[in-house]
Amino acid sequence: MPEGHTLHRLAAEITERFAGDVVRFSSPQGRFAAEAKAIDGRTLVGAEAWGKHLLLDVDDELWVHVHLGIFGRFTFGEPPAPRPLGQVRLRMTGPRAWADLRGPNACRLLDDGQRDALLARLGPDPLRDDADPDRAWARISRSRTPIATLLMDQSVIAGAGNIYRAEVLFRHQVDPLLPGRELSPQLWAAIWDDLRYLMRDGVRVGRIDTVRPEHEPEVAGRAPRVDRHGGEVYVYRRAGQACHVCRTPVATRVLAGRNLFWCPTCQPSGAPTGSGKPATASSHPDPH
DNA sequence: GTGATATGCGGAT
DNA sequence: TCCGCCTATCACT
């Protein structure tokens, strides 16, 4: 489930379970063994998320940088920790909790300079209060790259992934292939606001729900979605199924190596809608 | 048992 | 634009 909301939830959970405690670090699988040894028995100050990146603060001096990629997962529990099962890259054990990390794209130990370098290449994160959407707009408004690609570029916006990009473009009736420079500032502002709203909701409920209340009757008549991402959505991974709004079959193609989904009727190619006006009149509809 | 699949990303071409 | 890598799970044989 790792889009930005997952990482912010993880940071909160790690902070809650380990902050202020002496933590034993190990790598049952072995691939983080030397690094784990270097920080074993030190104090975990807390955890913080920047986009899809997680940074564990060890003594305000070293940082464990985790990127989950597609496969990475944390599991938590209360002591005593069970025997490690499967490929556990990192195990943390504190007095109140243990945590296992499997399958991360990255699990590394960073110093200050490396941490700063990492953060410097990330765009604004809609989930962070210090985020500046103008930094993203500076890139988008000059780019011929499709907006669907820009939304996945972590140096443009940090934290949105394949689900949020597909869903936010649907909610604003934007053609995914529209070049960034053809968006109006108003449309960009609306997309940013909506991303903030949707991702905060994702942090709150732990899943990605994007369907507006007025469209819930469309999805209410059938079995709840059991897709692994767990949420109720308009287009993500619904290729060939009827659009919840207009019944047109949802389209799909691969763009920049990732699966893209959209409704050809609600998000027509050609002229940008430019209005930022969502599929319905409501401004910040709660998806619940 | 095998193969397909996945919410990601970096490096080579 | 393609490839490789990380891992668990599920639909198949």
Image: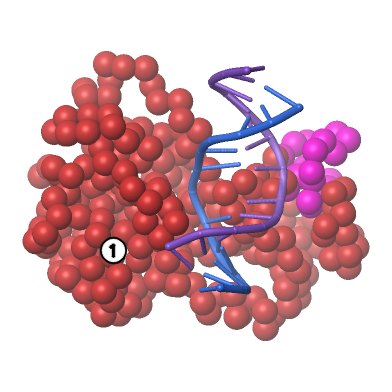
Chain colours: A red, B blue, C purple
**Left or right of residue A185, residue A78 in this image:** right
Magenta span = A76-101
Front one among A7 and A221: A221
Q: Residue at x 55, y 75 (%)?
A: A119
Please state the horizontal and vertical placement of residue A283, each as a whole percent of the image. 17, 49
Q: Is residue A200 visible?
A: no
Residue for point 40% across, 48% down:
A259
Q: How many marks?
A: 1
Taking the magenta stretch, the answer to whether it contains residue A83 is: yes
> Percent position (x, y) of residue A64?
72, 64
| Residue A118 % position (x, y) | 59, 75
Write the residue at 35% across / 53% down. Answer: A165
Judge whether residue A276 is colored magenta: no
The one of A99 and A275 positioned closer to us in this rendering: A275
What amino acid is labelled 1 in the image? Ile
Q: In this view, does A81 lie to the left or right of A191?
A: right
Quadrant holding the C terminus of chain A: top left
